[in-house]
Amino acid sequence: MRNLIAFLIKNSSWFIFIFLELICFYFIFQYNSYQRSIFLGASNEIVGKVYNISGEVVSYFGLKRANEELLLRNAELQDKLLNLEDYIYQKSIDSLKTRAILKDSVIKDNQYDFIISRVINNSISRIENYIWINKGSKEGIRTEMGVVSEQGIVGIVRSVSENYSVIQPVINPKTILSCKVKGSNIPGSLVWTGEDYRYVNLEGFPRYERFEPGDTIITSGYSGIFPEGIIVGYVEDSKGQSDDNFLTLKVKLSTDFATLKNVLVIKNNNKQEIIDLERLVSDDK
Amino acid sequence: MINSWLKQGLLFIVLILLQVLVLNHISFFNYATPFLYVYFIIKMPLAINRNILMLISFLLGLIIDIFCNTPGQNAAAAVFAAFLRRPVQLMFFEKEDFEHIIPNLSSLGASFMKYASLVVLIHHTVIISISSFSYINFSTIVLRIIFSSILTSILIFAVEGITVKKRVRE
């Protein structure tokens, strides 16, 4: 205690100095508006900086929690996204249905049904290309059904199992489709040359028929597999055939087989009727 | 002794009046303003208790502040100068010089000039820094400190010169 008092007395001038200066600066900052404004501004800045630093430090403590929350939120959003994607997918198929039906106003309601399906395997680089989809006979898919995508024609169902189907696409030399230039009624047959998965040939196109490069090629609807008016592709080029009365049109396919994701299988409800009728005719012979 | 305290009291009042009524209105080229009241701190007896010196300086500064409407500024500078007066006087004066009760030019000569100039410089540095309170115009502040210190020092030496002459005449 004595030491303390001695210490205080020994350094009394320091304490008095500091005390007096504190009073002075109190006065300065309290009653001088200019100094006060600078003091407040500076102190605000310092306080802000301190809070900033402490906030940065403290934020690390909450990192784990924040991370968990983010993960949860992420999962939630992922879920929402999937739902939305599914929804959009359904809607796009709906609109495709509408488009397909609108294109062919002759088709009666419910003559064609669409079965939505997803491509699970796809080949484009072989000569005989096939596409596997994840719907089968369970969903009502039968052989000889037409398959389209959002972009245009895809192919024909070749074989069906309970849950899966194999499609023989346009880019398979075995596939021959009846197609025509939009606006004309002369059908030609669509064949793939086996060279480039983006191009097919429309053979047997009469020379007298007029067309322009860029014209749309659509299905003719004669086979009963596809409704009339489904887009196949666009005319790119033409060359004469050997017999010179017909042209072969080089057609750029509207469907990009390399990135094919979702397809629609077209179910023709009247197909059996057509087949029965054909059988009647052939029986009569 | 009483006479000397009376003298100091008179100096106190005269310096305050001089500072408030005349010197505060001087501003040479916007740079030099004399703060002559620091002369009182310089002229206090060398052997005076440091704490008492600081309290008196505080009072002096505060009175000037009240007149100038700058509460705390002159007081802070005066207390600061009073606090550092002792180290300064230890720098320039021999121990036996403390026998002189009141420092003056005639008996202490060049060391008094150094001592007075340094106290003035300390005081002016503090007062001008506080009144500017930012180092944005650093060169201006430094120039103001230097010119004001020179001006105040000249005034102090002039006053001292007058008293020296008076003593010589006596």
Image (cartoon, coloured by chain):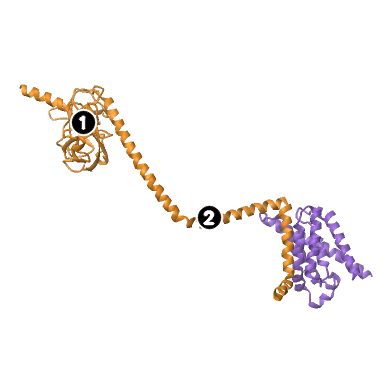
Chain colours: A orange, B purple
- What chain does badge 2 belong to? A
* Residue A251 sits in quarter: top left
Any mark on residue A282, and which? Answer: none
Any mark on residue A55, and which? Answer: 2
Q: Nearer the viewer, residue A227 or B148?
A: A227
* Residue A135 sits in quarter: top left
Residue located at (28% from left, 34% from top): A151
Q: Amino acid at mark 1?
A: Lys
Q: Amino acid at mark 2?
A: Gly
Label 1 sits on a secondary structure element that is strand
How far is mark 1 from mark 2, CA to CA? 64 Å
Q: Residue furthest front?
A: A1
- Counting other residues with Cα less than 10 Å from the Cα at mark 2, is it few (<14), some (14-19), or many (20 or more)? few
Provide residue B156's location: percent of width, then percent of height: 83, 63
Provide residue B117's location: percent of width, then percent of height: 78, 66
Q: Which residue is mark 1?
A: A267
Provide residue B75's location: percent of width, then percent of height: 77, 59
Q: Residue furthest right?
A: B170
